[in-house]
Image (tube, helix red, strand yellow):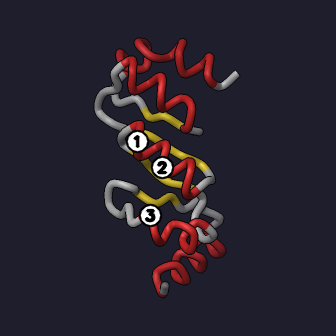
């Protein structure tokens, strides 16, 4: 848990938000202890986003090279922020993602 103390110091000193990358560390048994020290998580799949939302709380951010229509339908339910890798990808999904934020 020393890493959590370091993150807490960084957050206090800078005012930044700390997100956990689920792709790098997804040991769900630790999420309860970790969640109190994080602002949310980063996900690269709809399943990761859902688990992050369900077990970590906070903000869920998603970003990947491409999203299918089915992925986007699931991601907009759980994500606070979605990163599009290209302008054309944003154009393809902008209506779907905008409707979810209303």
Toward the front, the furthest residue is: 29
**Circles 2, 1 touching at the beta carbon (< 8 Å):** yes
* Closest to the observer, 95 or 74: 74
Where is residue 59 drawn, in percent x and y? 59, 48
Earlier residue among tags 2 and 3: 3
Residue at coordinates 47% horizontally, 72% vertically from top-left? 30
User: Quadrant location of residue 101?
Assistant: top right
Q: Which mark is residue 93?
A: none
Q: Secondary structure at mark 2?
A: helix
Toward the viewer: 18 or 28?
Answer: 28
Residue 2 at x, y percent in the picture: 48, 87
**Residue sitting at the far right:** 102
Query: What crowding class fits label 2: few (fewer than 14 Cα within 10 Å), some (14-19), or many (20 or more)?
Result: some
Residue behind mark 3: 28
Residue 14 position within the rendered picture, expressed as x and y whole percent measured from the top left: 61, 68
From mark 2 to mark 1, how far is it between C-alphas? 6 Å
Q: Are marks 2 and 3 in contact (CB under 8 Å)?
A: yes
> How many residues crowd around disc 1 within 10 Å: few (fewer than 14), some, or many (20 or more)?
some
- For disc 2, the marked residue is 51
Q: Residue at x 52, y 78 (%)?
A: 4
Is residue 48 placed above or below 10 in the rendered structure? above
User: At numbered mark 3, what does the secondary structure look like: helix, strand or loop?
Assistant: helix
Residue at 59% of width from left, 76% of height from top?
A: 8
Furthest toward the left, the residue is 65
Few, some or many residues within 10 Å of mark 3 (<14, 14–19, 20+): few
Residue receiving disc 1: 47
In percent of width and height, residue 48 lies at: 41, 46
Q: Give whichever of discs 3 and 1 has the lower sequence position.
A: 3
Q: Quadrant of residue 9?
A: bottom right
């Amino acid at each position: 848990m020393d890493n959590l103390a370091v993150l807490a110091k960084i957050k206090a000193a800078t005012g930044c938000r700390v997100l956990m990358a689920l792709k790098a560390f997804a040991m769900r048994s630790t999420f309860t202890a970790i969640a109190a020290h994080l602002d949310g998580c980063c996900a690269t799949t709809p399943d990761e986003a859902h688990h992050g939302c369900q077990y970590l709380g906070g903000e869920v951010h998603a970003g990947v090279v491409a999203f299918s229509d089915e992925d986007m339908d699931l991601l907009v339910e759980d994500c606070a922020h979605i990163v599009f890798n290209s302008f054309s990808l944003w154009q393809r999904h902008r209506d779907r993602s905008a409707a979810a934020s209303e």
